[in-house]
Image (spheres, rainbow, N blue to C red):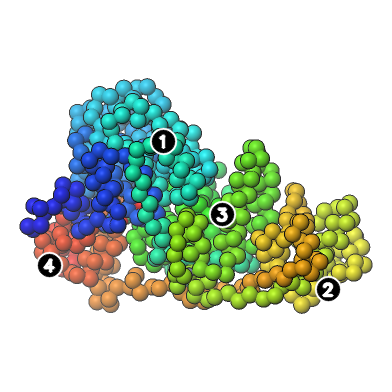
Amino acid sequence: MASLETASPALEVLRRVFGYDSFRGEQETIVEHVASGGDALVLMPTGGGKSLCYQIPALVRPGVGIVISPLIALMQDQVDALNALGVQAGFLNSSQDFEERRLTEAMYQAGELDLLYLAPERLRVPATLDLLDRGRIALFAIDEAHCVAQWGHDFRPDYLGLSELHERWPKVPRIALTATATKATHAEIASRLKLDDARHFVASFDRPNIQYRIVPKAEPKKQLLDLLRTEHKGDAGIVYCLSRSSVEKTAEFLVANGIDAVPYHAGLDSRTRAENQARFLREDGLIVVATIAFGMGIDKPDVRFVAHLDLPKSVEGYYQETGRAGRDGLPSTAWLAYGLQDVVQQRKLIDQSDGDDAHRRRQSQHLDAMLALCETVECRRVQLLAYFGQESTACGNCDTCLTPPESWDGTIAAQKLLSTIYRLQRERRQKFGAGQVIDILLGRKTAKVIQHDHDTLTVFGIGEELSESGWRGVARQLLAQGLLAVEGDYGTLVLTDASASVLRKERTVLLRREKVTKAAAKTAKKAAVELPAEAEPLFERLRAWRAATAKEQGVPAYVIFHDATLREIATSSPQTLEELGRVSGVGENKLAKYGQQVLDTLSG
Ligand code: ADP
Ligand code: ZN
């Protein structure tokens, strides 16, 4: 391989250690910049390839790369994955016993490590700082850097202390990385980490292999089951729910329907949590039903879908969570079911949250942006990327592109709903939520309607042209458009200043027509996942070999080889070690360690 001799040291490491041919996008510029001692702030979507941006400079520069990461539970896996590549990596966190810690510290001081992972709270301990002083530091990488931003959703107080790294070690380059990138977060990271001289790298945030879909919520668990059965049989995925109890119920529901699923939320004891996370990482095709406590830093490459059964609190959160799908670049689904109750509940949570008015206002802005994304009639991806300040054109791979929504003139429906609320509001004695309003519109003589004499109102029964779910859709869209608001503990619907113009017939209201479809009208582009028929038995044999090897070594299967690498091996069916070494993802160390076994597996 003559080309290796002329390659830069960074490219040489990329090829030899990681087994990849070339850098992606801005990786090369970032790596060269940091390797030559510059500071960098890197905004790149999940799956974009951030890790190499600090791992390669750490390998090229003399000394040890210090990686600050909040993800204690994942450090072991990260270190295992690096060790499998032949990289010397270690970590220091509270999960270790004394002996393990001492060993890692000794290796650090002796300069035997390439990379050392540290939890941010470690840096508050003077002993850690003294230890770092006794070795040579190649660079500081600050992973999940958005944790320093209070504007965002993952704020960690310990991150605020990281600005001191620069004061203590002014000559050591720093690289901060995150997949969260609104303008506000971006600016806050730069200023809080005092990255004054850093070069900023902002990659495109598009994840073209993820198909975004947002559907009206009817029976969410059944809708989910339908999605899994029709499009994601046997696939690994994450299902997000807002509350612990809905996590539990949803996981039970899936299991009862023969689907392999485990729960994950902060209320479970730490052993169960660790066990469920480990199973998700190690097994093929397991589903985790979780609160947002789950997922940061999970770099399982073959998560095929992320489903939300409740509305996320912000577009940033939604984007991070859905970004966990399809890191391997293969087609994946981001699916969200959302309904009127979500809006009512989120508004309530904001009203009740502690913190000052500014905090509540910020949360409200986050929610409004999320609602705008849900109700858009335009391409979801265009709207998502616009939220991160990036322009794009209609993607052809989201629900609104695939099945453009129709709109209808909902002015009269809006007037009916708003005037019903107006009449209830005039009573003042008691507050009513959407349920009562809709019962009145539909002319239902329920006990509660009769008790309050609501069947004598002039609006009683004036809305029989729509179904109950139709009216819920109208109310939800009016809420999203600010023509209606919710208030108080019971989710009372109240008029806004803007409602008056609708009631006075001064404006028309355009609404989105909704069909509660079962799964998607059109399925994701599956083509890229499918192997040529003749390669399938080989792929299955390789997978079985990988599962056995991973089990034997106690590491996740993808630490051995990624799916994408196994696919390429199965398709190209290499006959020699040299041929195998040319497959993307097969580096020097893995070739030496597994090469012969892979060839034996191929020849059956
Ligand atoms: P991020 O941390 O940005 O989410 P990762 O660093 O985990 O992304 O990279 C995502 C995937 O892309 C990983 O499987 C990684 O091995 C792969 N990858 C990264 N850079 C390259 C490259 N230059 N060539 C091929 N694969 C790459
Ligand atoms: Zn689109």
Residue 462, labelled with which disc? Answer: 2
* Residue 575, numbered label: 4
Per the rendering, the mark at residue 193 is 1
Q: Disc 1 residue type?
A: Leu
In this picture, residue 261 sits left or right of residue 579: right
Q: Is residue 144 above or below residue 95?
A: below
Q: Secondary structure at mark 4?
A: loop
The mark nearer the N terminus, 3 or 4, is 3
Q: Tags 2 and 4 in contact by the CB under 8 Å rule?
A: no
Residue of label 3: 312
Q: CA distance from mark 3 to mark 4?
A: 49 Å
In front of the other: 131 or 369: 369
Give the amino acid at mark 2.
Ile
Residue type at the position of mark 3? Pro
In contact (CB < 8 Å): disc 3 and disc 4:
no
> Measured from the top left, where is residue 129 in percent x and y?
33, 25
Q: Position of residue 471 (x, y in %)?
A: 73, 69
Mark 1 or 3 closer to N-term?
A: 1
